[in-house]
Amino acid sequence: MSNSRRSFLRDLAGSVRDVAAAAQPDARKVPDTFLASGDRMERYSRQLVLPEWSESAQAALAGSSVLVVGAGALGSPVALYLAGAGVGRIGIVDDDEVELSNLHRQLLHYTPDVGVPKALSAAAKLGFLNPEVVVEPYQARLEAGNAAGMVEGADLVVDCSDSFETRYAVNAACCAARIPLVEGGVLGTSGLVMAVRPGEGACYRCAFPAPPPDAPSCATAGVLGPAAGVIGSLQALEAIKLLTGVGEPLTGAFLQCDLATLSFLRVNVQRRPDCPDCAE
Ligand SMILES: [Zn+2]
């Protein structure tokens, strides 16, 4: 990148500096000179040039630690976009190994990865994408018994799991530790996204107090790869909003997405005073 271009981006980023820094204490973990070294200015130039973005937003991402639960159809786009955007530390929790039937939708894994633990396969790809990101693979299954320990220290959790049991465990742990959470799910050609700021709005269990009876799985009901890609991309978007203060996260509501007809419905959700996860 030329010096004039670098200077232009610096001036532009400075001119649009917003209140995100004040709202995002993590930005202070990273020195002001963060973007001055290496190729960072160029790597992140297309988001730095956004009028809504700023060096503070970039520093907030660099100072953030995000736990991604699941390295499958949703976790793949989530982790790729977060690593690409410059999140400083990404933990990947998955106890599965890559299977041939995963590859049409799980973008972090390729044919030679069949049989490889997904957490390790994911970490390798993310390292190629952005070597500055610290990726921590955990070959484990997040459950109610270990959820609190797994989410501890994270600034944000993105739940990309495929079971209601795991979703409730993640939600309860994030509510207890007041860690922001982005939930998501996809099946067939429809999906759902919800952002949660514990203590400030409805949590996942407020919206869905109990799992649906006889919920089908992707193995039985099927799923289209791009449908998972849309939902995972929306989760990554919500995560970036929550981490930087840029945009308006989907809190206090969930987005129901019918991708067969491209119909999107935003459903507002109130906190339940008797919610076992988030009630005061
Ligand atoms: Zn709740």
Image (cartoon, grey):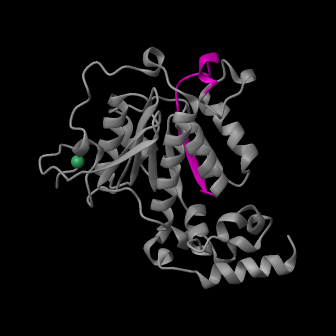
Residue 123 quadrant: top right
Look at the image and tell me in which quarter the N terminus lies.
Answer: bottom right
Closer to the camera in the image, 254 or 129: 254
Residue at image location 46% in from the left, 30% down from the top: 189
Question: Quick check: 22 above or below 222?
Answer: below
Q: Residue at image x 70%, y 24%?
A: 113
Report the residue that reaches farthest toward the front. 261
Q: Is residue 252 left or right of residue 133?
A: left
Is residue 102 a member of the stretch shown in magenta?
A: yes
Range covered by the magenta-colored residues:
86-104
State the image coordinates of residue 33 (x, y, percent, origin top left): 69, 76
Q: x%, y% of residue 97?
A: 59, 21
Residue 229 horizontal side relative to residue 190, left or right: right
For this rendering, which residue is in front, 95 or 10? 10
In the figure, 85 relative to 228: above or below? below
Q: Position of residue 257 (x, y in %)?
A: 41, 41
Q: Residue furthest right?
A: 2
